[in-house]
Image: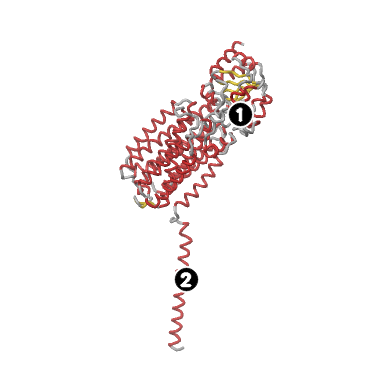
Amino acid sequence: MSLTLSMFSYLVSSVCCIMALRGLSGPNTAKGGLYFGIGGMALAIVTTLVMPGMQSFPLILLGVALGGAIGAGIAIKIEMTALPQLVAAFHSLVGLAAVMIAGAAFGNPEAYRIGEPGSIHTGSLVEMSLGVAIGAITFTGSIIAFGKLQGIIPGKPVTFKGQHFVNACLGAALLALIILLCLAQSAIVFWAIVAVALLLGVLMIIPIGGADMPVIVSMLNSYSGWAAAGIGFTLQNNLLIIVGALVGASGAILSYIMCKGMNRSFFNVILGGFGGEAAGGTAAAVSEKPVKIGSADDAAFILKNAATVVIVPGYGMAVAQAQHALREMADQLKKHGVKVRYAIHPVAGRMPGHMNVLLAEANVPYDDVLELEDINRDFALTDVAFVIGANDITNPAAKKDPASPIYGMPILDVESAGTVLFVKRSLGSGYAGIDNELFFYDNTMMLLGDAKKMCEGIIKALEHA
Amino acid sequence: MSSEQLTNQATDIAKNAAVLAQQAADFTMQVHQYVAPAGAAAPFFVTGLTVFVLACFVGYYVVWRVTPALHSPLMAVTNAISSVIIVGALIAVGLSDNASSKAMGFLAVVLASVNIFGGFIVTRRMLQMFSKKKK
Protein backbone atom coordinates (compact mmCIF):
# COMPACT_ATOMS: atom_id res chain seq x y z
CA MET A 1 0.00 0.00 0.00
CA SER A 2 1.41 3.39 -0.91
CA LEU A 3 2.09 5.98 1.75
CA THR A 4 -0.67 8.26 0.46
CA LEU A 5 -3.22 5.49 0.52
CA SER A 6 -2.28 4.39 4.02
CA MET A 7 -2.44 7.98 5.28
CA PHE A 8 -5.87 8.22 3.73
CA SER A 9 -7.11 5.10 5.46
CA TYR A 10 -5.67 6.35 8.78
CA LEU A 11 -7.81 9.45 8.23
CA VAL A 12 -10.91 7.30 7.75
CA SER A 13 -9.99 5.43 10.91
CA SER A 14 -9.66 8.71 12.86
CA VAL A 15 -13.11 9.81 11.71
CA CYS A 16 -14.50 6.46 12.88
CA CYS A 17 -13.03 7.08 16.35
CA ILE A 18 -14.65 10.53 16.48
CA MET A 19 -17.98 8.94 15.47
CA ALA A 20 -17.59 6.40 18.29
CA LEU A 21 -17.54 9.22 20.84
CA ARG A 22 -20.23 11.16 19.00
CA GLY A 23 -22.57 8.16 19.28
CA LEU A 24 -22.46 8.32 23.06
CA SER A 25 -24.59 11.48 23.10
CA GLY A 26 -27.63 9.23 23.65
CA PRO A 27 -28.36 5.60 24.54
CA ASN A 28 -29.97 4.91 21.16
CA THR A 29 -27.00 5.95 19.05
CA ALA A 30 -24.34 4.58 21.39
CA LYS A 31 -24.18 1.10 19.93
CA GLY A 32 -23.78 2.37 16.38
CA GLY A 33 -20.92 4.51 17.63
CA LEU A 34 -19.30 1.47 19.19
CA TYR A 35 -19.27 -0.33 15.83
CA PHE A 36 -17.65 2.73 14.26
CA GLY A 37 -14.94 2.48 16.93
CA ILE A 38 -14.35 -1.22 16.28
CA GLY A 39 -14.28 -0.62 12.53
CA GLY A 40 -11.82 2.23 12.89
CA MET A 41 -9.53 0.13 15.03
CA ALA A 42 -9.64 -2.81 12.60
CA LEU A 43 -8.89 -0.50 9.66
CA ALA A 44 -5.91 1.01 11.50
CA ILE A 45 -4.45 -2.43 12.24
CA VAL A 46 -4.94 -3.74 8.69
CA THR A 47 -3.47 -0.57 7.18
CA THR A 48 -0.37 -0.96 9.31
CA LEU A 49 0.00 -4.65 8.50
CA VAL A 50 0.03 -4.09 4.73
CA MET A 51 2.76 -1.45 4.93
CA PRO A 52 5.71 -2.31 2.67
CA GLY A 53 8.40 -4.40 4.33
CA MET A 54 6.27 -5.77 7.17
CA GLN A 55 7.47 -9.14 8.40
CA SER A 56 7.01 -11.48 11.39
CA PHE A 57 3.30 -11.98 10.81
CA PRO A 58 3.15 -15.18 12.93
CA LEU A 59 4.61 -13.28 15.88
CA ILE A 60 2.10 -10.42 15.44
CA LEU A 61 -0.77 -12.85 15.15
CA LEU A 62 0.37 -14.65 18.28
CA GLY A 63 0.53 -11.34 20.17
CA VAL A 64 -2.93 -10.21 19.08
CA ALA A 65 -4.45 -13.65 19.78
CA LEU A 66 -2.84 -13.86 23.21
CA GLY A 67 -3.81 -10.33 24.22
CA GLY A 68 -7.25 -10.63 22.65
CA ALA A 69 -8.01 -13.85 24.53
CA ILE A 70 -6.92 -12.36 27.86
CA GLY A 71 -8.83 -9.14 27.26
CA ALA A 72 -12.01 -10.84 26.09
CA GLY A 73 -11.87 -13.33 28.96
CA ILE A 74 -11.60 -10.59 31.57
CA ALA A 75 -14.23 -8.37 29.95
CA ILE A 76 -16.83 -11.14 29.69
CA LYS A 77 -16.40 -12.34 33.27
CA ILE A 78 -16.04 -9.06 35.13
CA GLU A 79 -18.79 -7.99 37.55
CA MET A 80 -20.29 -4.60 36.74
CA THR A 81 -19.53 -3.46 40.29
CA ALA A 82 -15.82 -4.00 39.60
CA LEU A 83 -15.82 -1.65 36.59
CA PRO A 84 -13.76 1.18 38.12
CA GLN A 85 -10.83 -1.07 38.96
CA LEU A 86 -11.08 -2.79 35.56
CA VAL A 87 -10.83 0.56 33.77
CA ALA A 88 -7.90 1.56 35.98
CA ALA A 89 -6.14 -1.72 35.15
CA PHE A 90 -6.72 -1.20 31.42
CA HIS A 91 -5.25 2.30 31.63
CA SER A 92 -2.09 0.88 33.12
CA LEU A 93 -1.72 -1.41 30.09
CA VAL A 94 -1.92 1.53 27.67
CA GLY A 95 0.75 3.27 29.73
CA LEU A 96 3.08 0.27 29.66
CA ALA A 97 2.49 -0.28 25.94
CA ALA A 98 3.45 3.37 25.29
CA VAL A 99 6.68 2.86 27.27
CA MET A 100 7.49 -0.30 25.30
CA ILE A 101 6.86 1.34 21.93
CA ALA A 102 9.00 4.34 22.80
CA GLY A 103 11.70 1.92 23.99
CA ALA A 104 11.51 0.01 20.72
CA ALA A 105 11.68 3.25 18.73
CA PHE A 106 14.70 4.41 20.71
CA GLY A 107 16.53 1.15 20.11
CA ASN A 108 15.64 0.93 16.44
CA PRO A 109 14.85 4.40 15.05
CA GLU A 110 15.35 3.38 11.39
CA ALA A 111 12.12 1.37 11.47
CA TYR A 112 10.21 4.56 12.31
CA ARG A 113 12.25 6.77 9.94
CA ILE A 114 13.33 9.14 12.70
CA GLY A 115 17.13 8.86 12.33
CA GLU A 116 19.96 6.50 13.16
CA PRO A 117 20.75 5.02 16.59
CA GLY A 118 22.77 7.65 18.43
CA SER A 119 21.67 10.44 16.10
CA ILE A 120 17.89 10.57 16.41
CA HIS A 121 16.40 13.96 15.46
CA THR A 122 16.15 16.22 18.51
CA GLY A 123 12.45 16.93 17.91
CA SER A 124 11.68 13.22 17.85
CA LEU A 125 13.66 12.74 21.05
CA VAL A 126 11.63 15.38 22.90
CA GLU A 127 8.34 13.88 21.71
CA MET A 128 9.52 10.38 22.50
CA SER A 129 10.65 11.24 26.01
CA LEU A 130 7.41 13.09 26.76
CA GLY A 131 5.41 10.10 25.49
CA VAL A 132 7.46 7.64 27.51
CA ALA A 133 7.31 9.75 30.70
CA ILE A 134 3.52 10.19 30.53
CA GLY A 135 3.16 6.51 29.67
CA ALA A 136 5.24 5.44 32.66
CA ILE A 137 3.31 7.75 35.04
CA THR A 138 0.06 6.33 33.67
CA PHE A 139 1.33 2.80 34.18
CA THR A 140 2.27 2.96 37.87
CA GLY A 141 -0.39 5.56 38.73
CA SER A 142 -3.11 3.30 37.35
CA ILE A 143 -1.72 0.31 39.22
CA ILE A 144 -1.95 2.25 42.49
CA ALA A 145 -5.48 3.42 41.60
CA PHE A 146 -6.40 -0.17 40.79
CA GLY A 147 -4.98 -1.36 44.12
CA LYS A 148 -6.95 1.26 46.02
CA LEU A 149 -10.21 0.48 44.22
CA GLN A 150 -9.72 -3.26 44.60
CA GLY A 151 -8.88 -2.84 48.28
CA ILE A 152 -5.35 -4.29 47.98
CA ILE A 153 -3.86 -0.95 49.03
CA PRO A 154 -5.64 0.94 51.85
CA GLY A 155 -8.00 3.52 50.36
CA LYS A 156 -6.93 6.06 52.96
CA PRO A 157 -4.50 8.69 51.75
CA VAL A 158 -0.88 7.71 52.44
CA THR A 159 1.01 10.87 53.28
CA PHE A 160 4.48 11.60 54.57
CA LYS A 161 6.42 14.73 55.37
CA GLY A 162 7.87 16.62 52.42
CA GLN A 163 5.77 14.65 49.94
CA HIS A 164 5.13 17.58 47.62
CA PHE A 165 8.80 18.53 47.81
CA VAL A 166 9.87 15.04 46.75
CA ASN A 167 7.36 15.06 43.88
CA ALA A 168 8.55 18.49 42.73
CA CYS A 169 12.16 17.26 42.81
CA LEU A 170 11.24 14.20 40.76
CA GLY A 171 9.43 16.41 38.26
CA ALA A 172 12.48 18.65 37.95
CA ALA A 173 14.73 15.60 37.59
CA LEU A 174 12.48 14.35 34.79
CA LEU A 175 12.84 17.64 32.94
CA ALA A 176 16.62 17.64 33.39
CA LEU A 177 16.88 14.06 32.13
CA ILE A 178 14.87 14.90 29.00
CA ILE A 179 17.26 17.75 28.20
CA LEU A 180 20.21 15.44 28.89
CA LEU A 181 18.74 12.83 26.55
CA CYS A 182 18.57 15.36 23.72
CA LEU A 183 22.23 16.22 24.26
CA ALA A 184 23.69 12.77 24.95
CA GLN A 185 21.21 10.28 23.44
CA SER A 186 22.36 7.53 25.76
CA ALA A 187 20.20 4.52 26.55
CA ILE A 188 20.96 4.89 30.27
CA VAL A 189 19.39 8.36 30.31
CA PHE A 190 16.36 7.05 28.41
CA TRP A 191 15.71 4.30 30.95
CA ALA A 192 16.43 6.73 33.79
CA ILE A 193 13.52 8.84 32.50
CA VAL A 194 11.34 5.73 32.59
CA ALA A 195 12.45 4.89 36.16
CA VAL A 196 11.86 8.41 37.50
CA ALA A 197 8.45 8.61 35.80
CA LEU A 198 7.44 5.22 37.20
CA LEU A 199 8.32 6.40 40.71
CA LEU A 200 6.52 9.69 40.18
CA GLY A 201 3.37 7.80 39.11
CA VAL A 202 3.33 5.90 42.41
CA LEU A 203 3.99 8.96 44.56
CA MET A 204 1.39 11.08 42.76
CA ILE A 205 -1.51 8.69 43.35
CA ILE A 206 -0.62 7.20 46.76
CA PRO A 207 -1.69 10.30 48.79
CA ILE A 208 -5.13 10.44 47.18
CA GLY A 209 -8.08 8.98 49.09
CA GLY A 210 -10.62 6.45 47.86
CA ALA A 211 -13.43 8.97 47.44
CA ASP A 212 -11.35 11.02 45.00
CA MET A 213 -10.81 8.03 42.72
CA PRO A 214 -13.43 9.17 40.14
CA VAL A 215 -11.20 12.18 39.45
CA ILE A 216 -8.07 10.06 39.39
CA VAL A 217 -9.48 7.41 37.09
CA SER A 218 -10.59 10.12 34.65
CA MET A 219 -7.24 11.87 34.96
CA LEU A 220 -5.36 8.66 34.16
CA ASN A 221 -7.75 8.14 31.24
CA SER A 222 -6.66 11.55 30.02
CA TYR A 223 -2.97 10.73 30.54
CA SER A 224 -3.23 7.53 28.52
CA GLY A 225 -4.54 9.70 25.68
CA TRP A 226 -1.70 12.23 25.95
CA ALA A 227 0.80 9.34 25.99
CA ALA A 228 -0.73 7.99 22.78
CA ALA A 229 -0.50 11.45 21.20
CA GLY A 230 3.16 11.70 22.26
CA ILE A 231 3.89 8.37 20.59
CA GLY A 232 1.98 9.66 17.54
CA PHE A 233 4.35 12.62 17.25
CA THR A 234 7.32 10.24 17.47
CA LEU A 235 5.94 7.94 14.79
CA GLN A 236 4.74 10.93 12.72
CA ASN A 237 1.32 9.35 12.60
CA ASN A 238 -1.75 11.61 12.50
CA LEU A 239 -4.13 8.83 13.57
CA LEU A 240 -2.36 8.40 16.89
CA ILE A 241 -2.26 12.15 17.43
CA ILE A 242 -5.97 12.58 16.72
CA VAL A 243 -7.11 9.65 18.85
CA GLY A 244 -4.68 10.61 21.62
CA ALA A 245 -6.07 14.16 21.64
CA LEU A 246 -9.67 12.88 21.70
CA VAL A 247 -9.00 10.57 24.63
CA GLY A 248 -6.95 13.21 26.41
CA ALA A 249 -9.72 15.80 26.03
CA SER A 250 -12.37 13.30 27.13
CA GLY A 251 -10.50 12.37 30.30
CA ALA A 252 -9.79 16.01 31.08
CA ILE A 253 -13.46 16.97 30.72
CA LEU A 254 -14.54 14.06 32.94
CA SER A 255 -12.03 15.09 35.63
CA TYR A 256 -13.36 18.64 35.41
CA ILE A 257 -16.97 17.46 35.82
CA MET A 258 -15.97 15.30 38.79
CA CYS A 259 -14.06 18.14 40.46
CA LYS A 260 -17.02 20.47 39.98
CA GLY A 261 -19.26 17.82 41.55
CA MET A 262 -17.12 18.07 44.67
CA ASN A 263 -16.55 21.84 44.46
CA ARG A 264 -12.79 21.30 44.59
CA SER A 265 -10.09 22.47 42.26
CA PHE A 266 -8.15 19.94 40.26
CA PHE A 267 -4.95 20.84 42.11
CA ASN A 268 -6.65 20.36 45.45
CA VAL A 269 -7.44 16.78 44.44
CA ILE A 270 -4.00 16.13 42.97
CA LEU A 271 -2.18 17.42 46.03
CA GLY A 272 -4.18 14.82 47.92
CA GLY A 273 -4.43 14.01 51.61
CA PHE A 274 -8.19 14.71 51.62
CA GLY A 275 -10.28 12.68 54.01
CA GLY A 276 -9.26 10.83 57.13
CA GLU A 277 -7.95 13.77 59.12
CA ALA A 278 -11.23 15.67 59.52
CA ALA A 279 -12.98 13.03 61.63
CA GLY A 280 -11.94 14.08 65.07
CA GLY A 281 -13.46 15.76 68.08
CA THR A 282 -16.84 16.51 66.56
CA ALA A 283 -17.62 12.82 66.09
CA ALA A 284 -17.99 12.14 69.81
CA ALA A 285 -19.98 15.32 70.42
CA VAL A 286 -22.71 14.75 67.84
CA SER A 287 -23.22 11.07 68.48
CA GLU A 288 -24.81 12.00 71.84
CA LYS A 289 -27.88 13.27 69.96
CA PRO A 290 -30.84 10.93 69.56
CA VAL A 291 -31.11 8.99 66.34
CA LYS A 292 -34.28 7.35 65.09
CA ILE A 293 -33.54 3.81 64.06
CA GLY A 294 -36.13 1.87 62.09
CA SER A 295 -36.62 -1.65 60.84
CA ALA A 296 -37.41 -2.95 57.36
CA ASP A 297 -41.09 -3.18 58.33
CA ASP A 298 -41.18 0.48 59.40
CA ALA A 299 -39.54 1.47 56.12
CA ALA A 300 -41.99 -0.63 54.09
CA PHE A 301 -44.91 1.07 55.85
CA ILE A 302 -43.59 4.57 55.18
CA LEU A 303 -42.69 3.80 51.56
CA LYS A 304 -46.02 2.18 50.77
CA ASN A 305 -47.96 5.19 52.03
CA ALA A 306 -45.90 7.69 50.06
CA ALA A 307 -47.00 9.14 46.72
CA THR A 308 -43.52 9.93 45.45
CA VAL A 309 -40.20 8.33 46.34
CA VAL A 310 -36.73 9.39 45.16
CA ILE A 311 -33.95 6.85 45.56
CA VAL A 312 -30.42 8.21 46.05
CA PRO A 313 -27.83 5.49 45.43
CA GLY A 314 -24.15 5.71 46.34
CA TYR A 315 -21.01 3.62 46.45
CA GLY A 316 -22.44 1.52 49.31
CA MET A 317 -25.03 0.15 46.90
CA ALA A 318 -22.24 -1.02 44.60
CA VAL A 319 -20.33 -2.63 47.46
CA ALA A 320 -23.41 -4.50 48.70
CA GLN A 321 -24.44 -5.39 45.10
CA ALA A 322 -27.88 -4.15 46.08
CA GLN A 323 -28.99 -2.79 42.69
CA HIS A 324 -31.17 -5.79 41.76
CA ALA A 325 -32.89 -5.93 45.15
CA LEU A 326 -33.38 -2.17 44.97
CA ARG A 327 -35.06 -2.39 41.58
CA GLU A 328 -37.36 -5.18 42.84
CA MET A 329 -38.28 -2.98 45.78
CA ALA A 330 -39.07 -0.12 43.39
CA ASP A 331 -41.23 -2.47 41.28
CA GLN A 332 -43.19 -3.48 44.38
CA LEU A 333 -43.71 0.17 45.25
CA LYS A 334 -44.88 0.94 41.72
CA LYS A 335 -47.47 -1.82 42.12
CA HIS A 336 -48.72 0.08 45.15
CA GLY A 337 -49.06 3.16 42.95
CA VAL A 338 -45.97 4.98 44.21
CA LYS A 339 -44.03 7.15 41.77
CA VAL A 340 -40.38 6.07 42.03
CA ARG A 341 -37.43 7.94 40.57
CA TYR A 342 -33.65 7.85 41.03
CA ALA A 343 -31.33 10.80 41.68
CA ILE A 344 -27.69 10.50 40.61
CA HIS A 345 -25.00 12.80 41.98
CA PRO A 346 -22.09 13.35 39.56
CA VAL A 347 -19.54 11.89 41.99
CA ALA A 348 -21.63 9.01 43.36
CA GLY A 349 -19.62 5.81 43.09
CA ARG A 350 -16.03 5.37 42.07
CA MET A 351 -16.07 6.41 38.42
CA PRO A 352 -18.09 8.81 36.26
CA GLY A 353 -21.47 7.30 35.49
CA HIS A 354 -20.88 4.34 37.83
CA MET A 355 -24.39 4.42 39.34
CA ASN A 356 -26.06 4.73 35.95
CA VAL A 357 -24.39 1.54 34.75
CA LEU A 358 -25.36 -0.42 37.86
CA LEU A 359 -28.98 0.73 37.67
CA ALA A 360 -29.05 -0.11 33.96
CA GLU A 361 -27.70 -3.55 34.82
CA ALA A 362 -30.64 -4.03 37.18
CA ASN A 363 -33.05 -3.03 34.38
CA VAL A 364 -34.07 0.30 35.87
CA PRO A 365 -35.78 2.30 33.08
CA TYR A 366 -33.46 4.95 31.63
CA ASP A 367 -36.06 7.70 31.99
CA ASP A 368 -36.48 7.10 35.75
CA VAL A 369 -32.85 8.01 36.39
CA LEU A 370 -32.23 11.74 36.74
CA GLU A 371 -29.13 13.89 37.19
CA LEU A 372 -28.64 16.23 40.14
CA GLU A 373 -29.72 19.47 38.44
CA ASP A 374 -32.83 17.84 36.98
CA ILE A 375 -34.26 16.50 40.23
CA ASN A 376 -32.91 18.64 43.04
CA ARG A 377 -35.85 21.04 43.03
CA ASP A 378 -38.31 18.13 43.28
CA PHE A 379 -37.13 16.96 46.71
CA ALA A 380 -39.36 19.50 48.48
CA LEU A 381 -42.38 17.89 46.79
CA THR A 382 -41.19 14.35 47.51
CA ASP A 383 -42.65 12.26 50.32
CA VAL A 384 -39.73 9.93 50.89
CA ALA A 385 -36.05 10.18 49.97
CA PHE A 386 -34.49 6.72 50.12
CA VAL A 387 -30.72 7.11 50.52
CA ILE A 388 -28.90 3.85 49.95
CA GLY A 389 -25.15 3.64 50.42
CA ALA A 390 -24.61 7.35 49.84
CA ASN A 391 -23.47 9.78 52.52
CA ASP A 392 -21.32 12.82 51.77
CA ILE A 393 -23.33 13.75 48.67
CA THR A 394 -26.39 14.34 50.91
CA ASN A 395 -24.62 16.09 53.79
CA PRO A 396 -26.29 19.45 54.54
CA ALA A 397 -22.98 20.66 56.02
CA ALA A 398 -21.93 21.37 52.43
CA LYS A 399 -24.52 24.18 52.41
CA LYS A 400 -24.49 25.34 56.02
CA ASP A 401 -21.08 24.89 57.59
CA PRO A 402 -18.31 27.00 56.02
CA ALA A 403 -15.76 25.15 58.18
CA SER A 404 -16.66 21.79 56.68
CA PRO A 405 -14.16 20.34 54.22
CA ILE A 406 -16.96 19.72 51.76
CA TYR A 407 -18.47 23.22 52.09
CA GLY A 408 -19.75 24.47 48.72
CA MET A 409 -20.05 21.04 47.18
CA PRO A 410 -23.37 20.64 45.35
CA ILE A 411 -25.49 18.09 47.23
CA LEU A 412 -28.80 16.36 46.71
CA ASP A 413 -31.28 18.20 48.97
CA VAL A 414 -32.76 15.05 50.47
CA GLU A 415 -33.44 16.80 53.81
CA SER A 416 -36.27 18.80 52.23
CA ALA A 417 -38.22 15.60 51.51
CA GLY A 418 -41.02 14.61 53.90
CA THR A 419 -39.10 11.66 55.32
CA VAL A 420 -35.52 10.58 54.74
CA LEU A 421 -34.82 6.85 54.95
CA PHE A 422 -31.10 6.32 55.27
CA VAL A 423 -29.77 2.81 54.61
CA LYS A 424 -26.31 2.50 56.08
CA ARG A 425 -24.18 -0.14 57.76
CA SER A 426 -23.35 2.00 60.80
CA LEU A 427 -23.57 5.56 62.03
CA GLY A 428 -19.95 6.17 61.04
CA SER A 429 -18.79 8.97 58.81
CA GLY A 430 -18.43 8.71 55.03
CA TYR A 431 -15.29 8.59 52.94
CA ALA A 432 -14.58 12.25 53.42
CA GLY A 433 -14.44 11.51 57.17
CA ILE A 434 -17.15 14.04 57.97
CA ASP A 435 -20.16 13.48 60.20
CA ASN A 436 -23.51 13.82 58.54
CA GLU A 437 -25.91 15.85 60.70
CA LEU A 438 -28.73 14.54 58.55
CA PHE A 439 -28.71 11.36 60.68
CA PHE A 440 -30.00 13.38 63.64
CA TYR A 441 -32.76 15.29 61.86
CA ASP A 442 -36.35 14.77 63.05
CA ASN A 443 -37.51 13.58 59.64
CA THR A 444 -34.68 11.08 59.23
CA MET A 445 -34.97 7.39 59.98
CA MET A 446 -31.83 5.30 59.92
CA LEU A 447 -32.07 1.77 58.55
CA LEU A 448 -28.90 0.14 59.83
CA GLY A 449 -27.71 -2.94 57.99
CA ASP A 450 -26.43 -4.29 54.72
CA ALA A 451 -28.03 -2.46 51.79
CA LYS A 452 -29.01 -5.62 49.93
CA LYS A 453 -30.47 -7.38 52.99
CA MET A 454 -32.38 -4.22 53.92
CA CYS A 455 -33.95 -4.01 50.44
CA GLU A 456 -34.89 -7.69 50.58
CA GLY A 457 -36.44 -7.16 54.00
CA ILE A 458 -38.50 -4.24 52.70
CA ILE A 459 -39.64 -6.32 49.69
CA LYS A 460 -40.83 -9.08 52.04
CA ALA A 461 -42.71 -6.60 54.20
CA LEU A 462 -44.30 -5.02 51.12
CA GLU A 463 -45.43 -8.41 49.83
CA HIS A 464 -47.17 -9.19 53.11
CA ALA A 465 -48.88 -5.85 53.22
CA MET B 1 27.94 54.87 -35.96
CA SER B 2 31.51 53.98 -35.25
CA SER B 3 32.59 50.50 -34.36
CA GLU B 4 33.63 51.86 -30.95
CA GLN B 5 30.06 53.05 -30.17
CA LEU B 6 28.71 49.72 -31.26
CA THR B 7 31.06 47.88 -28.92
CA ASN B 8 30.06 50.16 -26.01
CA GLN B 9 26.36 49.59 -26.65
CA ALA B 10 26.90 45.85 -26.86
CA THR B 11 28.77 45.92 -23.54
CA ASP B 12 25.94 47.93 -21.90
CA ILE B 13 23.34 45.48 -23.14
CA ALA B 14 25.44 42.60 -21.90
CA LYS B 15 25.75 44.30 -18.48
CA ASN B 16 21.97 44.90 -18.35
CA ALA B 17 21.35 41.30 -19.27
CA ALA B 18 23.66 40.16 -16.51
CA VAL B 19 21.81 42.36 -13.96
CA LEU B 20 18.47 41.02 -15.16
CA ALA B 21 19.73 37.46 -14.90
CA GLN B 22 20.95 38.15 -11.38
CA GLN B 23 17.56 39.63 -10.45
CA ALA B 24 15.77 36.64 -11.94
CA ALA B 25 18.00 34.30 -9.94
CA ASP B 26 17.33 36.27 -6.73
CA PHE B 27 13.63 36.19 -7.44
CA THR B 28 13.69 32.43 -7.97
CA MET B 29 15.51 32.05 -4.65
CA GLN B 30 12.89 34.15 -2.91
CA VAL B 31 10.08 32.16 -4.49
CA HIS B 32 11.74 28.97 -3.26
CA GLN B 33 12.00 30.38 0.23
CA TYR B 34 8.29 31.14 0.33
CA VAL B 35 7.13 28.01 -1.40
CA ALA B 36 9.28 25.43 0.36
CA PRO B 37 7.66 25.47 3.84
CA ALA B 38 4.23 24.82 2.35
CA GLY B 39 5.49 21.89 0.31
CA ALA B 40 6.68 18.44 1.25
CA ALA B 41 9.72 19.76 3.08
CA ALA B 42 7.63 21.14 5.98
CA PRO B 43 8.72 19.60 9.29
CA PHE B 44 6.21 17.05 10.56
CA PHE B 45 6.06 18.69 13.96
CA VAL B 46 4.13 21.71 12.64
CA THR B 47 1.62 19.58 10.75
CA GLY B 48 1.31 17.24 13.70
CA LEU B 49 0.73 20.10 16.11
CA THR B 50 -1.97 21.54 13.83
CA VAL B 51 -3.72 18.19 13.75
CA PHE B 52 -3.28 17.79 17.51
CA VAL B 53 -4.77 21.18 18.41
CA LEU B 54 -7.71 20.76 16.05
CA ALA B 55 -8.35 17.25 17.38
CA CYS B 56 -8.38 18.63 20.95
CA PHE B 57 -11.14 21.03 19.91
CA VAL B 58 -13.12 18.27 18.21
CA GLY B 59 -12.72 16.13 21.32
CA TYR B 60 -13.84 18.99 23.55
CA TYR B 61 -17.08 19.57 21.67
CA VAL B 62 -17.86 15.91 21.08
CA VAL B 63 -17.30 14.89 24.71
CA TRP B 64 -19.43 17.70 26.17
CA ARG B 65 -22.34 16.31 24.19
CA VAL B 66 -22.03 12.90 25.83
CA THR B 67 -24.91 12.39 28.24
CA PRO B 68 -23.75 12.00 31.88
CA ALA B 69 -25.51 8.64 32.14
CA LEU B 70 -23.08 7.25 29.57
CA HIS B 71 -19.88 8.51 31.19
CA SER B 72 -18.80 5.00 32.19
CA PRO B 73 -19.10 3.62 28.65
CA LEU B 74 -17.29 6.76 27.47
CA MET B 75 -14.33 5.90 29.68
CA ALA B 76 -14.33 2.29 28.54
CA VAL B 77 -14.50 3.20 24.86
CA THR B 78 -11.83 5.91 25.07
CA ASN B 79 -9.69 3.37 26.85
CA ALA B 80 -10.21 0.94 23.98
CA ILE B 81 -9.49 3.45 21.22
CA SER B 82 -6.40 4.81 22.96
CA SER B 83 -4.96 1.36 22.28
CA VAL B 84 -4.62 2.51 18.69
CA ILE B 85 -0.96 2.85 19.71
CA ILE B 86 -0.89 -0.80 18.67
CA VAL B 87 0.05 0.74 15.30
CA GLY B 88 3.43 1.68 16.78
CA ALA B 89 3.79 -1.75 18.34
CA LEU B 90 3.08 -3.49 15.02
CA ILE B 91 5.78 -1.41 13.33
CA ALA B 92 8.20 -2.35 16.12
CA VAL B 93 7.56 -6.06 15.59
CA GLY B 94 7.25 -6.02 11.80
CA LEU B 95 9.97 -3.58 10.76
CA SER B 96 12.63 -3.76 13.47
CA ASP B 97 15.71 -5.82 12.88
CA ASN B 98 17.05 -5.77 16.41
CA ALA B 99 15.87 -8.36 18.88
CA SER B 100 15.21 -6.15 21.90
CA SER B 101 13.03 -3.73 19.92
CA LYS B 102 11.13 -6.69 18.50
CA ALA B 103 10.59 -8.13 21.98
CA MET B 104 9.36 -4.81 23.38
CA GLY B 105 7.11 -4.40 20.36
CA PHE B 106 5.68 -7.87 20.91
CA LEU B 107 4.90 -7.11 24.55
CA ALA B 108 3.23 -3.85 23.47
CA VAL B 109 1.12 -5.73 20.89
CA VAL B 110 -0.09 -8.12 23.60
CA LEU B 111 -0.88 -5.29 26.06
CA ALA B 112 -2.69 -3.18 23.47
CA SER B 113 -4.69 -6.20 22.27
CA VAL B 114 -5.86 -6.92 25.83
CA ASN B 115 -7.10 -3.35 25.91
CA ILE B 116 -8.74 -3.33 22.49
CA PHE B 117 -10.69 -6.53 23.01
CA GLY B 118 -11.35 -5.95 26.71
CA GLY B 119 -12.34 -2.31 26.24
CA PHE B 120 -14.73 -2.85 23.35
CA ILE B 121 -16.37 -5.92 24.91
CA VAL B 122 -16.91 -4.20 28.26
CA THR B 123 -18.36 -1.16 26.49
CA ARG B 124 -20.69 -3.40 24.53
CA ARG B 125 -21.84 -5.13 27.72
CA MET B 126 -22.59 -1.77 29.32
CA LEU B 127 -24.44 -0.38 26.32
CA GLN B 128 -26.51 -3.53 26.08
CA MET B 129 -27.76 -2.87 29.61
CA PHE B 130 -28.79 0.61 28.64
CA SER B 131 -30.64 -0.42 25.52
CA LYS B 132 -32.41 -3.61 26.61
CA LYS B 133 -35.09 -2.05 28.79
CA LYS B 134 -35.87 0.71 26.33
CA LYS B 135 -39.36 -0.54 25.56
Q: In the current view of this chain or complex, which residue is farthest to the top?
A: A464
Estimate the x, y position of residue A282 in percent, counting from the top left. Answer: 60, 26
Kindly tell me whether residue B59 is visible in this rendering. Answer: yes
Amino acid type of the residue that numbered disc 2 sits on in the rendered structure:
Gln
Which residue position is annotated with label 1?
Answer: A370
**Scheme of image coloration:** secondary structure
Q: Which residue is mark 2?
A: B23
Among the 4 quarters of the image, the one containing residue A366: top right
Residue A373 rendering spot, x and y as whole percentages: 63, 32
Q: Position of residue B47 (x, y in %)?
A: 47, 51
Circle 1 residues within 10 Å: few <14, some 14–19, many ≥20: some
Asked which secondary structure carries label 1, the reply is strand
- Does residue A88 appear left or right of residue A253 in this picture? left
Q: Which quadrant is home to the C terminus of chain B?
A: top right
Which secondary structure lies at badge 2? helix
Instruction: Single out the residue that lies furthest toward the right.
Output: A381
Labels 2 and 1 positioned on one and the same chain: no
User: Does residue A75 appear left or right of residue A332 in this picture?
Assistant: left
- Residue located 40% across and 44% down the image: A193
Vertical comparison of A21 with B14: above or below? above
Query: As shown in the figure, which amino acid type bears the numbered disc 1?
Result: Leu
Q: Is residue A38 visible?
A: no
Protein chain holding label 2: B
- Counting every numbered tag in the picture gives 2
Judge by depth and name the residue closer to the eye, A296 or A399: A399
Q: Nearer the viewer, mark 2 or mark 1?
A: 1
The answer to which of A33 and A333 lies nearer the viewer is A333
